[in-house]
Image (tube, grey):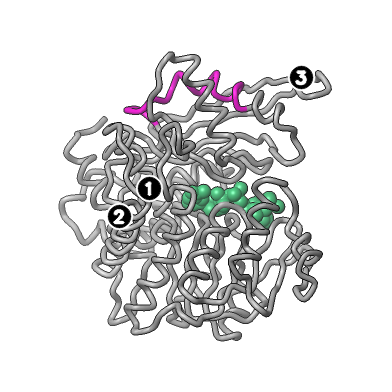
């Protein structure tokens, strides 16, 4: 078995060795899926995983735009259309200077499994650019978004590929891109999700990823007769996912003691309540400020420059910033400090060595493809509402989100049980795989 996995990885590595994040994601999935595939005759001789790791299509394009000084700037745009076996490509756009094809291929690959887990008919894709929105004026952001969409619009559509937000792409950027798409196509369609409420957006979409990751943690805890109530929670990031993960924790009577950004982490022993969180939301979403400004407003809190929050004692850790942000030594410290549950809000935030520590200590660990699927799930609900030309209430969407997270948890239990310990990673990989693989088999070799 080990040899089968190594041979497979070696084969993929031949073509992709220069893409470390993509290879990391492929390795993680292969380690649990190859034994499963070997145990199921219907997948034999179909080369199914080899077909799944190869994107159906990769688009790479120039985005030229003019900054406020009148200088011409050039960025690189991408869209990875990974797999459309169960529905049109669906997945976010990331604008961050670290964006490479490797990062977008890993995200697109993960997205295929995640979207399948939601049970909604969505294939997987991801895109973005190495454009850095930080420090740019509103006009510059708009011109970049327009330039990006002027190329991307040819390859997307409500029945083809429906992008959404991710790091660096929030409501403002979706608005500018939607406006440009509409102008170019002369159509008002649900081509992007994360839209504003008055022009086709869904209630609860901004909240969905963070809320969903907390609902997933609550499902895991309930399964072992525990709950989130009264627990101390450490959250990294202070963007969309982190903010709403914090909000839901507060609503469920947990105590959130940290948030972070790329400048460092804040620690608030008294807990971040809704009023303090509102300050963070205004700081990050409207003023585009830095997290250290929190301690100016709340001087009892402390700021730790350039540090991640994993040193702070907690019961629950929620990495909600970016990939590979939680390393082996962080995992060891979390365990030492008594952490019992990790629910990933970000994609692949825990390094493989860190995940191994969580599993060896048999604590609850949920991979992002399961725990952060609430965002894309509500994006799927936004698409459904757009098709119906109808809007559901906040309560309706939230209740559907809760059900979806519960169902994903159940699917992980079905396929991840290991003598009483739930291997959520294995459960999510297998449950996500089955639907996509079966659709691919039914559709022939295409
Ligand atoms: P945002 O851009 O809103 O926020 C990102 C946060 O992470 C910011 O606080 C940012 O800090 C921090 N961050 C980003 N890169 C780094 C880095 N290299 N080092 C330290 N901190 C960093 O993004 P989202 O909240 O939307 O996304 C966060 C994660 O969640 C990503 O992994 C994304 O793929 C994942 N995700 C998002 C979904 C969504 O619906 N938005 C859905 C599913 C997953 P700073 O501002 O200083 O850069």
User: In the figure, 304 relative to 196: above or below?
Assistant: below
Measured in 3D between alpha carbons, the distance from the residue under mark 2 to the one under mark 3, in whole angstroms, is 46 Å
Which comes sooner in the sequence, label 1 or label 3? 3
Q: Residue furthest right?
A: 69
Q: Respond yes or no on whether mark 3 lies under 8 Å from ligand 1.
A: no
| Up-down relation of residue 177 to residue 414 (above or below) | above
Q: Where is mark 1, residue-wise?
A: 378
Magenta span dominant secondary structure: helix
Q: Is mark 2 within 8 Å of ligand 1?
A: no
Coordinates of residue 355 in the picture (x, y in percent): 50, 70
Q: What is the crowding at mark 1: few (fewer than 14 residues within 10 Å), some, or many (at least 20)? A: many
Which residue occupies the foreground of this view, 99 or 378?
378
Does 413 sit above or below residue 134?
Answer: below
CA gap between label 1 and label 3 equals 37 Å
Q: Which residue is mark 3?
A: 72
Residue topped by disc 2: 400
- Residue 240 at what x, y percent from top left? 56, 52
Is 97 or 312 nearer to us in this picture?
A: 312
Q: Secondary structure at mark 3?
A: strand
Q: Is residue 147 magenta?
A: yes
């Amino acid at each position: 078995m080990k040899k089968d996995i190594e041979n497979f990885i070696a084969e993929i590595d031949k073509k992709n060795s220069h893409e470390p994040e993509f290879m990391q994601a492929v390795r993680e999935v292969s380690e649990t899926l190859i034994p499963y595939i070997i145990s199921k005759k219907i997948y034999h001789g179909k080369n199914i995983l080899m077909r799944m790791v190869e994107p159906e299509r990769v688009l790479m394009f120039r985005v030229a735009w003019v900054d406020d000084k009148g200088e011409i700037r050039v960025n690189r745009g991408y869209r990875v259309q990974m797999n459309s076996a169960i529905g049109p490509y669906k997945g976010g756009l990331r604008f961050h200077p670290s964006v490479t094809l490797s990062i977008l291929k890993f995200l697109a690959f993960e997205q295929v499994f995640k979207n399948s887990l939601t049970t909604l008919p969505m294939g997987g894709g991801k895109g973005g650019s190495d454009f850095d929105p930080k420090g740019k004026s509103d006009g510059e952001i708009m011109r970049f978004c327009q330039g990006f969409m002027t190329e991307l619009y040819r390859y997307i559509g409500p029945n083809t590929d429906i992008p959404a937000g991710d790091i660096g792409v929030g409501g403002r950027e979706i608005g500018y891109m939607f406006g440009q798409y509409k102008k170019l196509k002369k159509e008002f369609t649900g081509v992007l999700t994360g839209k504003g409420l008055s022009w086709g957006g869904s209630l609860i979409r901004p909240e969905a990823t963070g809320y969903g990751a907390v609902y997933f943690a609550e499902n895991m805890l309930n399964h072992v007769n525990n709950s989130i109530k009264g627990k101390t929670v450490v959250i990294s990031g202070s963007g969309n996912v982190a903010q709403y993960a914090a909000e839901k924790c507060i609503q469920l009577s947990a105590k959130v003691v940290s948030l972070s950004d790329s400048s460092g982490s804040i620690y608030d022993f008294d807990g971040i309540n809704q009023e303090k969180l509102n300050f963070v939301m205004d700081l990050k979403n409207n003023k585009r400020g830095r997290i250290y400004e929190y301690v100016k407003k709340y001087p009892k809190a402390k700021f730790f420059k350039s540090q991640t929050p994993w040193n702070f004692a907690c019961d629950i850790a929620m990495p909600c910033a970016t990939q590979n942000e939680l390393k082996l030594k962080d995992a060891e410290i979390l365990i030492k400090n008594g952490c019992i549950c990790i629910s990933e809000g970000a994609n692949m935030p825990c390094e493989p060595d860190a995940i191994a520590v969580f599993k060896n200590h048999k604590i609850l660990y949920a991979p992002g493809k399961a725990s952060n699927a609430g965002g894309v799930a509500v994006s799927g609900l936004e698409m459904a509402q757009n098709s119906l030309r109808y809007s559901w209430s906040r309560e309706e969407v939230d209740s559907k989100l809760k059900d979806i997270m519960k169902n994903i948890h159940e699917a992980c239990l079905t396929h991840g049980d290991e003598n009483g310990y739930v291997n959520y990673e294995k459960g999510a990989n297998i449950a996500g795989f089955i639907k996509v693989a079966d659709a691919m088999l039914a559709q022939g070799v295409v």
